[in-house]
Amino acid sequence: MTERLTIIRIGHRGDGVADTPHGPVYVPYALPGETVTVEAVPGNHPDRRHLIHVDHPSLERVAPPCQHFGTCGGCALQHWALPAYAEWKHGLIVEALKQAGLDTQVAPLIDAHGEGRRRIVLHARRGTHDVLEVGFSAPRAHHVVAVNACPVLAPSLAGALKAAWAIAETLKRAQKPLDIQFTATESGLDVDVRGSGQIKSQQIAELARVAQAHRLARLTRHGELVTQAEQPLVTIGRARVPLPPASFMQATTEGEAVLARLVREHVGKAKRVADLFAGIGTFALRLAENARVTAVDSEAKAVKALQRAAASAPGLKPIEAVTRDLFRRPLVAQELNGIDAVVFDPPRQGAEAQARELAKSGVKTVVAVACDRVTFARDVRILVDGGYRLTSVTPVDQFRYSYHVEVVGKLER
């Protein structure tokens, strides 16, 4: 059974929202001001509809740049003009802060898409009729949409899709679902394969041949080396960092540069800085150009890479790099004595335990970086309740066409 709805706004996850007598109804790929024909899909949540036809399109509707848009779940908003899309993303941060009781001016959204994504995870699965499919997950579904191109990827990831297909073909006899992570580095593509289970030595040799044929810098399975032509390296500030397998990096090169610039500006002339959830040193290695840095992260391999990079980089002040789980053992107030500024950039679950300890401390400046607006607002609320003042909030968009948005905030005691 079909029905006609008028879309009023875009929801938090990028769906069009129509207000009905029974509550809000969500319609993927519909835009504000549009009248659409939709239908309910058996098995879907009762407040969701499938878009059949746009009866009266918005003036902000544009042609998606990707042939797979609408079937691939990687992007939600390619059909929306960028100015309106940017205003919506800015509003997500404003609303999250408002819901946390924080009334603060939010700076304009910074577009940090740059050349595109430099990290992706491709999935390989057996599809209909046992046909191998390599690509991205479908929207809100478990099956894979096979792709042969992706417009949001940086040129440095050229060749990733072909290499993924070749890796999946090599391992298809294992009949296991695969996740294949690609990271573009200055040495070439760094690839980690997960999910293959135990494989025979013959397949290991075949994987090594695939890596050579596709000129991969390194190929690992669950972090264990299969073959390496070159050490994957990235430059951070003055340092050259040897990447551990499957390392976390910011999604785009431009995104990393923008976030690092904001962090350095907010830290200012601080002489002693703690960089928490430091990873491979995205901020720490830059901050050490002007300040002594204590860098803390739970990933031992990332900390070791940071240490190696710092030891060989010219002109840096001392960096003390420590492996520590900040969720279970946050730095307590006494450990923060003598620290002028703290930077924290946690995973999506945020840094609640660490924020509570910071709220008890005497640290003058805190710079909060987050990839989740809700946990950002929660952690900032804890700091404000502990005596800090939120003086700056800047949203950064390095996930174009998605509902994800980074945010950087400065707090002063």
Image (cartoon, grey):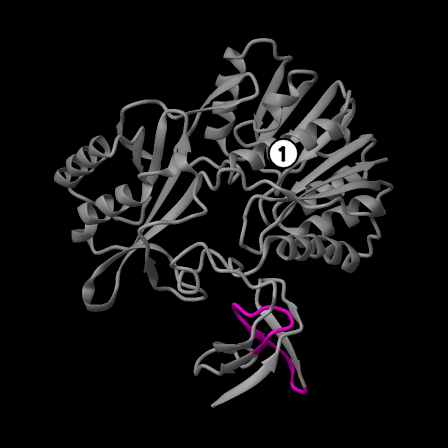
Question: Residue 245, image x and y in percent?
Answer: 39, 33
The quarter holding residue 27 reads bottom right
**Left or right of residue 251: residue 137:** left
Name the residue at 67% across, 73% down: 8
Seen as rendered, the residue at the extreme top is 315
As drawn, 130 above or below 289 = below
Name the residue at 57% across, 37% down: 255
Element on which disc 1 rests:
helix
The quarter holding residue 296 reads top right
Name the residue at 64% across, 18% down: 288
As drawn, 263 above or below 111 = above
Magenta-drawn stretch contains 28: yes
The residue that disc 1 covers is 258
As drawn, 331 above or below 143 = above
Q: Which residues are magenta?
A: 21-35
**Left or right of residue 308: residue 108:** right
